Amino acid sequence: MADSMSQADLVADFKASLHDCVGVFKAPDDADFKRILNVAALELSRYRTRTLVGEITLIPGQNAYDAPADFQAFKSPIWGISRPQPWEKNWTGPLPRCSCVSNGSISLMQLVPAPTDKQIAVLGSQYKFFYFARHVIGETANDTTIQAADRGLLILRSQAEACKEMAMRNLTKPVALRDGISNGPRNGTPSFLFQALMEQFERLAG
């Protein structure tokens, strides 16, 4: 379906935009094209932010917690917004500040200092917060988090990523493809095309 945001339709249009270069990517089941589209979606997250509400269960004295699966960056806490004031007898003291660390492929939320028994008793054990989430491309259009209005940007950034991969493979033949915004031709070596497409993407997305 034209302009559909489903994975299959995005892959089809992305492949069509690469013209003869499509033959460079040979992984079965269009795996290369799906991977590149996912990279482009992740990059688009920096320009088209997606804010969600997360929740973790606090344990007294514990400061490290698994972040949500689609976590990209912490935004702000909800927990403790209505906390008691210093002149009230149930004041909880300074609240933990959240920072993010990576443990291999796992993102962790680090609360410093660790929440205390009193803070959890007064404010509750469910730490709710706003966070920036990564964009994802779903099998159906409804499961894709990128807006249809940004479809061209997604294709454009995918083209740039494909050109970067072709440049890294030392392809020196001129290539021809069409961008995802104006459908205009872009001619040159992969490395030149990568720079040109990235400049266009950053200008249009910014």
Image (cartoon, rainbow, N blue to C red):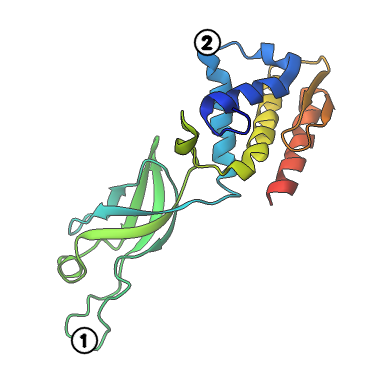
Q: Is residue 60 above or below residue 36?
A: below
| Residue annotated with mark 1 | 88
Q: Is residue 131 above or below residue 38?
A: below
Percent position (x, y) of residue 63?
27, 55
Quadrant containing the N terminus in the rendered view: top right
Nearest the viewer among 136 and 70 is: 136
CA neighbours of label 2 inside 10 A, class few (<14), some (14 to 19), many (20+): few
Percent position (x, y) of residue 171?
75, 15
Of helix, strand and loop, which one carries label 2?
helix
Nearest the viewer among 86 and 43 is: 43
Nearest the viewer among 52 and 69 is: 52
Q: Is residue 170 visible?
A: no
Percent position (x, y) of residue 154?
63, 37
CA neighbours of label 1 inside 10 A, class few (<14), some (14 to 19), many (20+): few
Question: In screen coordinates, is 106 left or right of 188?
Answer: left
Quadrant in the rendering for residue 4: top right
Question: In screen coordinates, is 127 left or right of 1?
Answer: left
Instruction: Identify the mark nearer the N-term, 2 or 1.
Output: 2
| Residue annotated with mark 2 | 28
At x 62%, y 34%, the residue is 3
At x 81%, y 21%, the residue is 176
Nearest the viewer among 157 and 172 is: 157
Of helix, strand and loop, which one carries label 1?
loop
Label ID, residue 39: none
Percent position (x, y) of residue 148?
59, 41
Which amino acid does the dot numbered 1 rest on?
A: Glu
